[in-house]
Amino acid sequence: MNLSGKRVILHDMSLRDGMHAKQHQISIDQMVSIAQGLDQAGIPLIEVTHGDGLGGSSVNYGFPAHSDEDYLNAVIPNMKQAKVSALLIPGIGTVDHLRMAKDLGVSTIRVATHCTEADVAEQHIGLARKLNMDTVGFLMMAHMTSASTILEQAKKMVSYGANCVYCTDSAGYMLPTEVTQKIGLLRRELPKDVEIGFHGHHNMGMAIANSLAAIEAGASRIDGSVAGLGAGAGNTPLEVFVAVLERMNVKSDVDLFSIMDVAEDLVVPMMDHPIRVDREALTLGYAGVYSSFLLFAQRAAKKYGVSARDILVELGRLGTVGGQEDMIEDVAITLSKQLAANK
Amino acid sequence: MNNKLKAAIIGPGNIGTDLLMKMKRSEWIEPVWMVGIDETSEGLKRAREMGVKTCSTGVDGVLAHIIADDIRIAFDATSAYIHAENSRKLNALGVLMIDLTPAAIGPFCIPPVNLKEHVKKLEMNVNMVTCGGQATIPIVAAVSQIQDVAYGEIIATVSSKSAGPGTRKNIDEFTRTTANAVEEIGGADKGKAIIIINPAEPPLMMRDTVHCLTKDKPDEKAITESILNMVKEVQKYVPGYRIKNGPVFDGNRVSVFLEVEGLGDFLPKYSGNLDIMTAAALRTAEMFAEESASGSLQLPSRA
């Protein structure tokens, strides 16, 4: 693979996707110090929101230690060069949240929908574009549909006003061939001035390989997370990815040793559990299940005396999509009733 | 003697057609007009085949027939944008309006919770909230009838095939309107609503989860009984409404996992979300008719 001379924008997820791994309990101090470390290391874009995006604070997804407003207010004024993005999932957050984020200085809004349901994002993408924001359409669980459907949905997002569209491997299910096929088709068919992005999870150990395949196929924005802090087995670990990019002569303007230090000195010490491909995270990838289900499934397994792996496999079989966290306890109860009936 | 109230349906789409099929079986409401805007539309064709009069020039086209045909009640299944006008014109002729759009210019109506109050007051316009609201607010109310609910949250999951372009274009309307009604009608101090659209094939049945956080430790026995009674009330007009799991008690959290299967009239059985709207709207109209027949309610007088 020859990527020499290419340029990518690295987008850090540790303070948004990483919120899943921390049950949305990252403190303001931790958030500011990590963001400052990333800013100094040259990361151009940092996402700061509840793990499930603006307005995600809920019983279903978890109540955060602080509100989106508080986090954004604390981080944004401390940034020297980095810009801050926010995630918005229609059906959870609304345009009111979007306006709030814009007012607090968020420059990039990422409007996320399930990969076949782009039309729920029309209001939000349209408004972000009207507000002159960097407007990204984020097609989640992209492994669940064909490349041609991803393209058709991406075109809808572009028609609403998105200047960048993501193919998002929310379940960490994809292998590099699939990434190449999907990103490649988007790059060939979408207008040249529309950027393509890739967001990976490491549940099958493929996040670095998939991100490289994405760059080769034409993606110019790659999501990752310092120390991999993210849902499931985490996102593409940024310090590793930066080292690989340097070896391959891909330009990212991120300083390797600085980001290594942020990972080791700031992020790893605050992890509640090691972010790795453990049995359940691997099940997510293998069964194609939304990565943030991990901790919920482990807790429900403990509470109802069933296996977390069985819960996740059943959620995969049911075709659940991002945001259906409420199904986890429901499935756990049903499985425990079945166990009791079979005794 | 025929005690049926005569009705007009505005909007011959999926909802309007399903409503018409249900109304044909009603002992209290007689469908007379189906109002659309396109003479050649499938919806008006279906309505003609089902033996009701049709009008293809919108509400204006039916105004001249309201008094002659003794139309007393109208169902608006169009859009929030034109509902206010439709309602104003029909109210002026003494027609009660049942609003199935997200316009919500009248008070919210969740039949087993507050329909009786609306009937007593002869509200001329009631709003049916949202599908997720119809499915979940009875449960929030069942809990808040027992003790104070500090926070009520509902998650509605509907199949992709049952989520029409109107819902998709205005998904924020769903979350806002439903959250408001969780507070106003459900009785929670603070409400939150989430909607998920799932494209699985075969389409999944409507699923709803209700989480209530009570102020004090929940009285498990009383709350369970209240919820089970409420489910029976909803089942009177939506037989496929059932508890899948729960109530679960976890600290101050009370959670109920629901499934809503439709009757499969015009809309497939998985579209419990659409069915619960049409069934609740018809149930609302029927109660106005029952009270009017028994003499306890005086409809606007007509010369």
Image: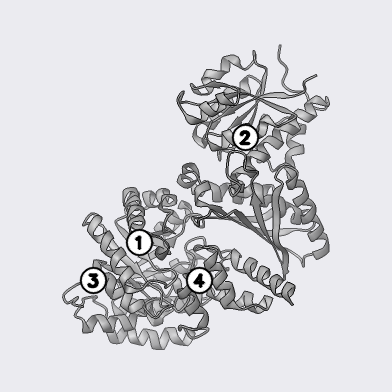
Q: Chain of mark 1?
A: A
Give the Cα distance between marks 2 and 3.
54 Å
Q: Nearer the viewer, mark 1 or mark 3?
A: 3
Amino acid type, residue under disc 4 in the picture: Ser
Q: Residues within 10 Å of mark 2 (few under 14, many from 20)?
A: many
Mark 4 or mark 1, which has the lower sequence index? 1
Q: Residue at x 75, y 57 (%)?
A: B143
Q: Residue at x 61, y 77 (%)?
A: A299
Classify residue A290 as left or right of residue A4.
right
Q: Nearer the viewer, mark 3 or mark 4?
A: 3
On the image, the x and y values in percent for residue A157 come to 35, 52
The front one of A44 and A2 is A2
Q: Quadrant of residue A258?
A: bottom left
Q: Are marks 4 and 2 on the same chain?
A: no
Give the Cα distance between marks 4 and 1.
23 Å
Q: Is residue A15 visible?
A: yes
Q: Are marks 2 and 3 on the same chain?
A: no
